C-alpha cells in the first residue's frame, strides 16, 4: 500500500503547500517533517494533521471532539494496519472490514470528507487498482466510497482514476 | 458512553485511567476475550468505546484522548499527536510481542529485549528535564505511554534494570504510578490480581503487525512503487472447493467418447413427436419506427439468444417475428411522407430486416402482418368469437370529417386545447400543457388533412367481452404461472389487470389501413391493431409454412415462449389469450413470458424526435462490430430492473471483460499450441489440479445451462466469463511458457496445460454462440472445431483430441478508445430540448443555419414572448382594431422565432462552414479507404473486417460532407445502406 513520503507530498500539494521537506528516519522508517525552529515532526499521521492545520483546513480534522477522535483512529488504523498488512489474507480482511464499516456511511467520519478519507484513499489506491471487477463488486460499499473520494475535486491529482462498474455484472453464484 | 472490553486488557487501562482522571462515568460491559462485538474490526478487537449511535471508537488511544477532550482536559498539541502515534505505530509492534513472550510464555529472546530498549532510550531522551511528556498537565500521551509500559515494568524479568538505566522514564513513571487515577484504573482493569491478570487478554487479542516486514516490502511501502511480484493477487484464490464426487463426475465426462450430434436445420421446421417443441416469438416491432437499442434488447435480441441456445440444446425450435404494419400510426406516417400505407410498410419492413440482419438476429422467419393470411386468420378467429357470443356491440362518440368521409383518429384532429387554450393541440395530447385530452373535447377541432371542422357522430363498434372470458383466463394462467417461466414483472402486471377487473374492449376502428371486419354492418371498419397484431404471430407462421396449424393448434406438443418489453405484457398475457381461449379452437397459447424492463440511454431516455440515443441503423455507423453491441446489450439487459446504456461503461466492459479476460485467454491458449507445439493438440495427462479445474468448469457450465434454460441471459454471460477467468488463472499458475523450456516431463506438462486450455477455448466458443455468433464462429475457425462441438450438454468433454490440428490463432477483440466513445456519446446526445412544435413560430423545418444555443438569451426572450403574448391577449380582449392586433402578433411571432433560434433549434448541431483544406485531405482519404473496401471485398475477406472498413469509409464521407459545408445526412444515400434518420 502506497508510500508515506509520496502521500505526504500529494496531500501537501492538495492542501496548497508549495513544497514540503520530508525525510525518512532510516532506522525506524518513519517520515519526518522539518518545521519552524529546526524541530522535526515525527510520524505520518502527525505530519498530515499538521499540514491540514497549517492550511486552515480544520474541516478535514473534524470540528467536534467526536469527529476528531474518529479521524485520529482511522489515521492510526491506516498506519498500524493498512500500511503494514503482510499477507494477502490480511489485506483481504482489511478491505472487508472497511467495506462493512462503510455499509451505512457516506464517508469514514460523519457526512463530509476528512483526512481519514483522503489518507485511506491514498493508501488503498494501489490495492484497488489491482482488484478485478468481480472483487470490486464484492466490496461494493468500499468501491462506492473509493469512487466517491477519488472524484472529489482536486483529490486524485497524480493518481490514475480507478475504474468501477456502474452496475452489478456478476451473478450471486460467481466465485 | 459505554466501554466494552474483555478482562485484563492493556488498552482498556488507557480508557479506565482517562475516565478516573476526568471523573467521566462509563458504563462498562465485560465480554469474553474472543467475543465478537459490533463496531470492532478484525485487527482491532477490544476494547470498544461506544460514544453514541453514530460513533464507536476501536482505537483505545483515540478513546482516551476523546474522554479528556470532552472533559476539557485535552492538551491541544502536536506533541500529543506525535506521542500517541509513536505508541501505536512504533512502540506497540515491538512491545506487544515482547509481552506475549514474557508474560504469556515466561521467556524472551534477547533480540526482543534489545528492540524494546531501543525504544525506551528514545522516550528517555524525550523526557529529559521534563515532569510530563507535554507541558505540565497530564495528557493522553502520558496515560497511553504509562499504560503501555506498565505491564512491562512490573514483569521485571528481562527489563529489571530499567529504572536505573532510564532515569527520566523512571522519574516520570513512578510519579504517575502514585496518581490516584492511575491506581484506580489499574485496580479496575486487573481486578487487583496484578500483572498476571493481563495474560489471558494479551494472548487473545491480535498482535499488531510489525512496522517493517522485510526489505522488499519496505521498499515498496516507502517509494510507493508497486513491486509486481509482491502485490500480485494469489493465483489460486479458490474460495469454493470442489467435492470428490464433482471431480469424479467431471473427469468421467471429460473422457466421454461419444457426444450428441448437432441437428441440422431444415425448413420448414415442424413439431416432432417426442421432442421438445419450442415456439419462440418476439414482440412484433411497429413498422413506422426505427428500433433503438432498447427495442432490440427488449425483444428480438433476447429471443434470439434464447433461440440460439435452444438450437444448441438440440431442441426442436422455431423463432418467428415480423413487422406490425396496420393502424393509425402507419396512416399518419404515410400522410407525412406522401406515400401509401403499403409503400410505407414496404420501406420500413426492409429497414427493420436490414437492422436485424446486421445484428445477426437469426430468425427462422421474419414476416409482416399486412398479408392475406392475416385477414383470413383474423376473420376466422373473429367469427369463432362471434358465434360463441363473446362479441358485443356498443356505440362510441367520435369525430367524423364529412369531406374526407371518415372518422378521425385522435392524431388526425387538431384544435384548441380545452385546458390551456393552446391553439395547436393534437387530438390526444396538448403539446403545450402536456395534458392528455379527448379528441371530442377539443375546441374548434379541425381535420388534420383537409382542415374542415369535423362533427361528433356516434358510431357502432364491436367489443370483445373480456369479463365473460375472465374465469377461463384465470384458470389457464394459474397453471402457466406455476409451470412456466414468467418474469416477475409479467406476473405482477397480469395479476393487477385481472384484479382491477376486465372491461369489454373495443376491437374495431374507423380506419382504412387494417384487417377488414367481415360482419355485416361493420364492413367499413377494420380491426383495432391490438386485436389483430398478436394474430400476426399466427399469420406470419402461415406465410412461412402451410402446415402452420401443427404449431398453432397443438398445445399438447408445443411450448410457446413470448419475448417482449414490459409495456406489451397485458396484450400477450390477457387480451390475446382471451381471444384464443374464446375462439376455443385448440390454439397454442402462451406458456412462458419473458418481459424486459426499460433500457435508458446515458442519463435519460431514448428519443427519436430529439435524436437522443443510438438507433438500430446508427449502431452500424459507429464501426463497432455487431457482436460487441450484442455482448454489451446482453450484459446490461434490463432483466429485473431498468438499466442504462453508457458509452463509458461500454468501453470498460469491452476492454476489461472481452479484451483482457476472454480474448486474452483464448488467444494465449491457442498461440501456445500454434507456436510451441506446431498447432497440434498434445496428450493430456490430468493431474489432480487439472481434475479440480474440470470440476470447477463443469460447475460453471451447469450454472450457465441452468441460467439460459430459465432465460436469465444476463447471468449466463457471467458464467462464460468465469470459465475464461478460470482458464486465465490456470495458465498463470502453470506458466507453460517456462515449462516448455524445461526437461521432457516439464515439456509434456506444458503440452497438457495448453491442450486443456485449447479445449476450454473450444467450449467457450460454443457457450458464446448465443451471445456473439460471429466471434464464436471465428474462435471455432481458429481452433478448427469439430462439427459435433455445437451442442451444449452439461458436460465438459474433451473434443480437441490429441493430434488435432488447430487453425491460425488471431486476436479476437479490439481495444475501444475512450476518446472515440466520447465522440459517439456526443454525436448521439441529441440537440437538447426540442420543443419545436410548441412554439408556433418554428413549426416548419427551418434552414440549417448554424445557431448555437444561448441559454441567457433564450431566458430573456422567453420573458419577452410572455410579455408580448399578454399584450396581444389584452388587445384582443379590448377589441382593438385589427391592424393593431396584427402588428402586435407580428412582433410576437418574430420574438418566438428569435427564441427558437436562441434555443439552438433548427441548427443541425454542426457548423456548416466549408473548410477547403480539410475537404481536400478527406477526399484523398475517402478514395483510399474506398480502395481498401473494394480490395477486401474482392479478396472475400470475412464480413466483420469488411464491415469495419465500410464503417470507416462512411465516417470519412460524413466528415468530408461536413468539411464541404453540406448536411451529412443528405450524403448518406450514396453509402451502402440508406440511413434514414427522420
Image (cartoon, coloured by chain):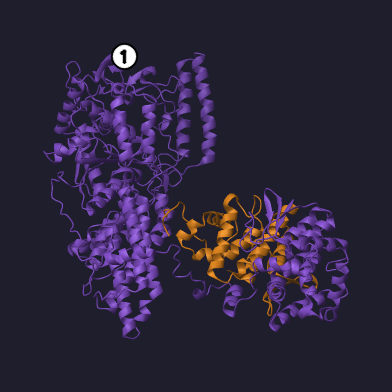
Chain colours: A orange, B purple
Mark 1 belongs to chain: B
Write down the quadrant of residue B189 in the picture.
Answer: bottom right
Q: Relative to B497, is B72 on the left or the right? A: right
Write down the quadrant of residue B167 in the picture.
Answer: bottom right
- Quadrant of the image containing the C terminus of chain A: bottom left
Q: Secondary structure at mark 1?
A: strand
**What is the x, y in percent for residue B297?**
33, 46
**What is the x, y in percent for residue A72?**
70, 60
The number of numbered discs placed on residues in the rendered structure image is: 1
Write down the quadrant of residue B661 in the picture.
Answer: bottom left
Q: Is residue B278 above or below residue A36?
A: above
- Can you see residue B816? no
Neighbor class of circle 1 (other Cα within 10 Å; few <14, some 14-19, many 20+) is: some
- Can you see residue B26? yes
Q: Relative to B12, is B286 on the left or the right? A: left
Instruction: Identify the residue position indicated by label 1 in the image.
Output: B455
**What is the x, y in percent for residue B56?**
68, 54
- Closer to the camera in the image, B448 or B318: B318
Question: Given the current orientation, which residue lies at the most extreme front position?
Answer: B193
**What is the x, y in percent for residue B437?**
40, 23
- Closer to the camera in the image, B966 or A71: A71
Residue at 35% over, 84% down: B741
- Closer to the camera in the image, B628 or B236: B236
Q: Is residue B300 above or below residue B106?
A: above
Q: Is residue B399 above or below residue B557?
A: above
Question: Given the current orientation, which residue lies at the most extreme left position?
Answer: B546
Q: Is residue B400 above or below residue B911?
A: above
- Closer to the camera in the image, B431 or B632: B632
Amino acid at each position: 500500500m502506497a508510500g508515506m513520503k509520496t502521500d505526504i507530498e500529494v496531500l501537501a500539494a492538495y492542501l496548497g503547500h508549495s513544497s514540503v521537506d520530508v525525510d525518512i528516519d532510516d532506522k525506524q522508517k518513519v517520515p519526518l517533517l522539518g518545521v519552524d525552529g529546526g524541530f522535526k515532526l515525527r510520524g505520518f499521521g502527525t505530519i498530515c494533521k499538521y499540514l491540514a492545520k497549517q492550511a486552515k483546513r480544520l474541516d478535514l480534522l473534524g470540528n467536534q471532539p467526536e469527529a476528531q477522535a474518529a479521524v485520529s483512529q482511522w489515521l492510526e488504523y491506516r498506519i498500524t494496519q493498512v500500511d503494514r498488512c503482510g499477507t494477502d489474507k490480511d489485506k483481504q480482511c482489511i478491505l472487508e472490514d472497511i467495506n462493512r464499516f462503510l455499509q451505512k456511511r457516506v464517508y469514514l467520519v460523519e457526512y463530509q470528507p476528512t483526512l481519514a478519507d483522503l489518507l485511506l484513499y491514498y493508501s488503498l489506491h494501489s490495492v484497488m487498482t489491482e482488484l478485478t471487477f468481480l472483487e470490486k463488486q464484492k466490496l461494493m460499499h468500499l468501491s462506492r466510497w473509493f469512487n466517491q473520494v477519488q472524484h472529489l475535486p482536486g483529490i486524485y491529482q497524480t493518481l490514475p482514476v480507478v475504474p468501477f462498474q456502474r452496475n452489478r455484472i456478476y451473478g450471486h453464484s460467481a466465485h | 458512553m459505554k466501554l466494552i472490553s474483555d478482562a485484563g486488557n492493556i488498552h482498556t487501562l488507557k480508557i479506565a485511567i482517562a475516565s478516573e482522571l476526568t471523573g467521566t462515568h462509563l458504563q462498562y460491559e465485560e465480554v469474553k476475550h474472543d467475543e465478537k462485538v459490533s463496531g470492532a474490526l478484525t485487527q482491532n478487537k477490544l476494547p470498544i468505546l461506544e460514544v453514541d449511535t453514530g460513533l464507536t471508537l476501536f482505537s483505545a488511544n483515540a478513546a482516551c484522548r476523546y474522554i479528556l477532550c470532552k472533559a476539557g482536559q485535552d492538551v491541544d498539541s502536536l506533541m500529543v499527536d506525535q506521542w500517541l502515534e509513536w505508541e501505536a505505530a512504533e512502540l506497540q509492534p515491538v512491545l506487544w510481542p515482547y509481552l506475549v513472550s514474557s508474560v504469556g510464555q515466561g521467556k524472551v529472546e534477547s533480540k526482543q529485549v534489545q528492540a524494546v530498549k531501543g525504544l525506551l532510550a528514545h522516550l528517555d531522551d524525550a523526557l529529559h528535564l521534563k515532569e510530563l511528556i507535554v507541558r505540565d498537565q497530564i495528557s493522553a500521551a502520558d496515560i497511553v505511554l504509562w499504560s503501555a509500559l506498565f505491564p512491562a515494568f512490573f514483569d521485571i524479568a528481562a527489563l529489571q534494570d530499567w529504572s536505573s538505566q532510564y532515569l527520566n522514564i523512571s522519574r516520570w513513571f513512578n510519579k504517575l504510578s502514585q496518581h490516584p487515577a492511575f491506581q484506580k484504573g489499574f485496580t479496575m482493569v486487573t481486578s487487583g490480581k496484578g500483572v498476571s491478570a493481563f495474560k489471558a487478554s494479551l494472548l487473545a487479542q491480535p498482535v499488531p503487525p510489525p512496522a517493517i516486514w522485510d526489505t522488499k516490502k519496505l521498499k515498496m511501502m516507502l517509494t510507493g512503487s508497486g513491486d509486481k511480484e509482491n502485490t500480485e493477487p494469489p493465483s489460486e484464490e479458490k474460495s469454493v472447493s470442489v467435492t470428490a464426487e464433482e471431480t469424479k463426475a467431471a473427469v468421467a465426462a471429460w473422457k466421454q467418447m461419444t457426444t450428441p450430434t448437432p441437428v441440422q436445420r431444415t425448413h420448414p421446421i415442424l413439431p416432432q413427436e417426442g421432442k421438445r417443441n419450442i415456439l419462440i416469438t418476439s414482440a412484433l416491432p411497429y413498422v413506422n419506427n426505427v428500433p433503438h437499442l432498447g427495442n432490440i434488447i427488449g425483444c428480438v435480441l433476447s429471443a434470439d439468444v434464447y433461440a440460439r441456445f435452444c438450437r444448441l440444446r438440440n431442441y426442436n425450435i422455431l423463432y418467428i417475428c415480423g413487422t406490425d404494419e396496420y393502424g393509425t400510426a402507419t396512416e399518419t406516417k404515410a400522410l407525412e411522407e406522401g406515400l401509401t400505407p403499403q409503400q410505407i410498410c414496404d420501406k420500413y419492413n426492409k429497414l427493420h430486416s436490414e437492422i436485424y440482419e446486421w445484428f445477426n438476429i437469426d430468425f427462422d422467419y421474419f414476416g409482416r402482418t399486412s398479408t392475406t393470411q392475416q385477414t383470413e386468420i383474423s376473420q376466422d378467429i373473429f367469427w369463432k368469437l362471434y358465434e360463441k357470443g363473446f362479441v358485443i356491440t356498443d356505440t362510441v362518440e367520435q369525430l367524423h370529417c364529412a369531406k374526407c368521409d371518415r372518422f378521425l383518429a385522435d392524431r388526425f384532429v387538431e384544435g384548441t386545447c380545452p385546458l390551456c387554450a393552446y391553439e395547436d393541440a393534437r387530438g390526444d395530447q396538448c403539446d403545450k400543457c402536456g395534458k392528455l385530452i379527448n379528441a371530442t373535447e377539443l375546441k374548434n377541432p379541425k381535420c388534420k388533412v383537409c382542415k374542415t371542422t369535423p362533427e361528433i357522430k356516434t358510431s357502432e363498434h364491436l367489443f370483445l367481452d373480456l369479463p365473460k372470458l375472465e374465469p377461463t383466463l384465470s384458470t389457464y394462467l394459474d397453471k402457466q404461472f406455476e409451470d412456466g417461466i414468467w418474469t416477475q414483472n409479467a406476473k405482477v402486471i397480469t395479476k393487477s389487470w385481472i384484479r382491477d377487473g376486465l372491461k369489454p374492449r373495443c376491437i374495431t376502428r374507423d380506419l382504412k389501413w387494417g384487417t377488414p371486419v367481415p360482419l355485416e354492418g361493420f364492413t367499413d371498419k377494420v380491426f383495432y391493431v391490438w386485436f389483430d397484431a398478436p394474430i400476426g404471430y399466427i399469420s406470419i407462421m402461415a406465410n412461412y409454412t402451410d402446415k402452420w396449424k401443427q404449431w398453432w393448434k397443438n398445445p399438447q406438443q408445443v411450448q410457446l415462449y413470448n419475448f417482449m418489453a414490459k409495456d406489451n405484457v397485458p396484450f400477450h398475457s390477457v387480451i390475446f389469450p382471451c381471444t384464443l381461449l374464446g375462439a376455443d379452437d385448440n390454439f397454442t397459447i402462451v406458456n412462458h413470458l419473458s418481459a424486459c424492463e426499460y433500457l435508458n440511454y446515458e442519463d435519460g431516455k431514448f428519443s427519436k424526435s430529439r435524436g437522443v440515443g443510438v438507433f438500430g441503423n446508427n449502431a452500424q455507423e459507429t464501426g463497432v462490430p455487431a457482436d460487441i453491441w450484442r455482448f454489451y446489450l446482453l450484459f446490461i439487459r434490463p432483466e429485473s430492473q431498468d438499466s442504462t446504456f453508457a458509452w463509458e461503461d461500454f468501453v470498460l466492459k469491452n476492454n476489461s471483460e472481452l479484451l483482457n479476460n476472454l480474448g486474452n485467454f483464448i488467444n494465449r491458449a491457442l498461440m501456445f499450441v500454434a507456436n510451441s507445439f506446431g498447432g497440434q493438440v498434445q496428450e493430456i495427462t490430468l493431474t489432480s489440479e487439472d481434475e479440480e479445474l474440470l470440476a470447477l468448469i463443469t460447475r460453471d457450465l451447469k450454472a450457465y445451462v441452468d441460467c439460459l434454460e430459465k432465460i436469465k441471459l444476463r447471468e449466463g454471460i457471467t458464467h462464460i466469463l468465469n470459465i475464461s477467468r478460470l482458464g486465465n488463472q490456470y495458465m498463470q499458475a502453470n506458466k507453460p511458457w517456462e515449462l516448455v523450456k524445461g526437461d521432457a516431463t516439464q515439456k509434456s506438462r506444458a503440452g497438457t496445460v495448453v491442450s486443456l486450455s485449447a479445449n476450454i477455448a473450444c467450449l467457450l466458443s460454443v457457450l458464446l454462440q448465443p451471445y456473439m455468433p460471429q466471434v464464436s464462429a471465428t474462435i471455432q475457425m481458429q481452433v478448427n472445431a469439430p462439427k459435433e462441438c455445437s451442442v451444449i450438454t452439461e458436460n465438459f468433454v474433451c473434443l480437441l483430441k490429441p493430434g488435432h490440428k488447430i487453425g491460425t490463432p488471431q486476436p479476437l477483440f479490439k481495444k475501444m478508445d475512450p476518446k472515440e466513445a466520447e465522440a459517439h456519446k456526443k454525436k448521439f446526445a441529441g440537440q437538447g430540448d426540442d420543443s419545436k412544435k410548441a412554439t408556433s413560430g418554428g413549426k416548419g423545418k427551418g434552414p440549417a443555419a448554424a445557431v448555437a444555443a444561448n441559454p441567457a438569451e433564450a431566458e430573456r426572450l422567453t420573458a419577452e414572448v410572455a410579455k408580448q403574448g399578454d399584450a396581444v391577449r389584452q388587445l384582443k380582449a379590448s377589441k382593438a382594431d385589427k391592424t393593431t392586433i396584427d402588428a402586435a402578433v407580428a412582433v410576437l411571432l418574430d420574438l418566438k422565432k428569435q427564441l427558437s433560434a436562441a434555443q439552438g433549434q433548427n441548427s443541425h448541431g454542426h457548423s456548416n462552414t466549408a473548410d477547403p483544406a480539410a475537404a481536400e485531405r478527406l477526399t484523398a482519404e475517402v478514395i483510399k479507404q474506398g480502395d481498401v473496401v473494394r480490395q477486401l471485398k474482392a479478396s472475400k475477406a470475412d464480413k466483420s473486417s469488411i464491415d469495419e472498413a465500410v464503417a470507416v469509409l462512411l465516417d470519412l464521407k460524413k466528415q468530408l460532407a461536413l468539411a464541404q459545408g453540406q448536411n451529412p445526412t443528405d450524403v448518406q444515400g450514396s453509402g451502402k445502406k440508406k440511413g434514414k434518420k427522420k
